[in-house]
Image (cartoon, grey):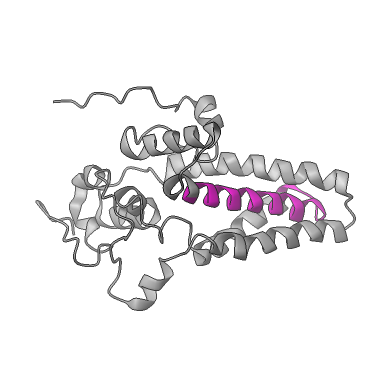
Amino acid sequence: MVAEGFTVDLNKPLVFQVGHLGETYEEWVHQPIVTKQGPRFFHSDFWEFLTLTVWWAVPVIWLPVSVWCISMSVRRGLSLPEIVPLIALGIFIWTLIEYTLHRFLFHIKTKSYWGNTAHYLIHGCHHKHPMDHLRLVFPPAATAVLCFPFWNLVKLFTTPSVTPALFGGGMLGYVMYDITHYYLHHAHPTRAVTKNLKKYHLSHHFRIQDKGFGITSSLWDIVFGTLPTTKAPKREQ
């Protein structure tokens, strides 16, 4: 289904076009188009709607879920001094999940029709249209689906009273991540810390796409040796 010499028509829905790019998809997707308004994905209005998410939907939907999970551990007998470290651990574990997903799933190399199509839906669209304000945070429907395996994974390794607080901490980490990600793209930081974080993340988009996978911090880039260099590597002639 890959078409040699295929050119994407940006005036038509993109999702089922990008697969035809084959091996050239990787180069195409990392040539960003910087506009706040993104392209159309699907002909269907229903499927198109599911790809669009305002940033504030993330805290409105998922902060109550996080609080409810944490309160469940309280009802199961854990005290505040026991719960606080679990929440902190959940946030910390999320930072590793954030890094791992971004590096190994969101930046997986593809060249087949369905591989390119899936990658574009998951993350490629964000690199092609990095300022698309309605496709920056994760859609709630997709997050809800992913909650089930993550909940069961936590449940597998912890006790019934610990599971909700640890999961709630991880959910809180996710909310912090998505809000931070939106902020880095669309806000104008005034403090040194947030200015540097914005510069760090935009470097991943516009300079060195195979480095700088951390969003909320550079911790795991330092640990695993994917910290961006100060200068972008020279392209081969």
Between 36 and 5, the one nearer to me in the picture: 36
Residue 78, position as x, y percentages in the image: 88, 52
Residue 150 is left or right of residue 131, and the answer is: right
Kindly give the residue lying farthest to the front in the view shown. Answer: 190
Residue 137, position as x, y percentages in the image: 47, 56
Residue 73 lies in quadrant: bottom right
Residue 151, position as x, y percentages in the image: 66, 56
Residue at (40%, 32%) from the top-left corner? 211
Kindly give the residue lying farthest to the bottom in the view shown. Answer: 45
Residue 30 is left or right of residue 145, and the answer is: left
**Main secondary structure of the magenta stretch:** helix
For the C terminus, the image quarter is top left
Vertical relation: 98 (above or below) 2: above
Residue at (41%, 61%) from the top-left corner? 134
Count of numbered tags: 0
Between 176 and 236, the one nearer to me in the picture: 176
Does the magenta portion include 232?
A: no
Vertical relation: 8 (above or below) 227: below
Does the magenta portion include 163?
A: yes
For the N terminus, the image quarter is bottom left
Kindly give the residue lying farthest to the left in the view shown. Answer: 5
- Stretch in magenta: 157-182
Residue 32 is left or right of residue 132, and the answer is: left
Residue at (60%, 59%) from the top-left corner? 59
Residue 186 is left or right of residue 97, and the answer is: left
Residue 177, position as x, y percentages in the image: 55, 47
